[in-house]
Amino acid sequence: MHLLYVHGLGGSLRAQPEIEAVFLPAGFRVVRIPVPYHDNPLALFGRLATLTFADLCLWIHEGAERLIRTAQLFAPEEYAVIGDSLGGFISVVAAERDSRISHCVLLACSGDICDAATRLHRLNRALALVVGRFAPGDGEDLKTAARKATSGESSSQREFELVDTLRPDRLSCLRNLLILGDKRDPVAPEVVCLGFAQRVRNATVRMVYNERRHHPIGKDALERYALPFLRDQPVPPVLMVPSKRRMLAGIEKLLIALLKALRRRSRGPNWPVP
């Protein structure tokens, strides 16, 4: 089976080599889809600096159309899509349009475009300073337009309708959906991922990290959860592994406690310990 992979915001065709490392040995043929405006750093910066909600919707729309056109060249039969962050929205929009997409995997992506747009500034400080900084001043800002779009009141409603992933008729086109993420991802938190998945007939959510940040899904998680999903096998429950940062912090605390205990023992019970 062909597997079309779409990278995230700021990524490239070389992003996440774990995709090939996991899926090529399993027999999948991987095709990478470039996200629009990512072939030139200056073009991407300009796009982000002038970004409006309408632009974001058209960006996703263009990416989904590119994915489907590429699939027509490389995957004449059924195929699967896997998208990371922004690439996840492109993937799910494509899956709602192309009935040949049998499986859709979202990495660090909730599937809810409006909710993600209101949280985009939380991705990192640099992005918060750049996004929409030089957008036209007479229109709604990105967050306001995204909030209004859910009730049909945004000035960008026409563009949003192109990619509205929450429409029941489009949700019914999703055949198999898997969401992998971080419980406290500031852009795609667990509650939003679960809310989107509940609208899909055959959806599975596995929040495989708990690190309070927006980050790639690693090789181990892809092997444990995505691989069986794509093979139509049961997706195992989450095996929560502490992050390296928390493990190192725990080891550091343990060593400090042991050091203090040794000092007390060597200096006597009445010796003050700093």
Image (cartoon, helix red, strand yellow):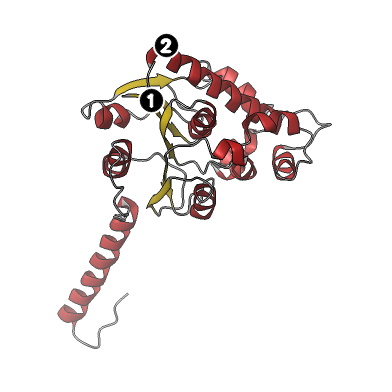
Q: Earlier in the sequence, mark 2 or mark 1?
A: 2
- The residue wearing badge 1 is 79
Q: Which residue is mark 2?
A: 73
- At 64% from the left edge and 44% from the top edge, which residue is drawn? 118
Q: Which residue is at the front of the view, 188 or 3? A: 3
Quadrant of the frame with the C terminus: bottom left
Residue at the left extreme, as displayed: 266
Q: Amino acid at mark 1?
A: Tyr
Residue at position x 70%, y 44% in the image: 150
Examine the rendered structure and indicate whether residue 187 appears above or below residue 103.
Answer: below
Secondary structure found at label 1: strand
169 or 84, nearer to the observer: 169
Amino acid carrying label 2: it is Leu
Corner quadrant of residue 264: bottom left
Going by the image, does 26 lie left or right of 73?
Answer: left
Pick the residue in front: 196 or 223.
196
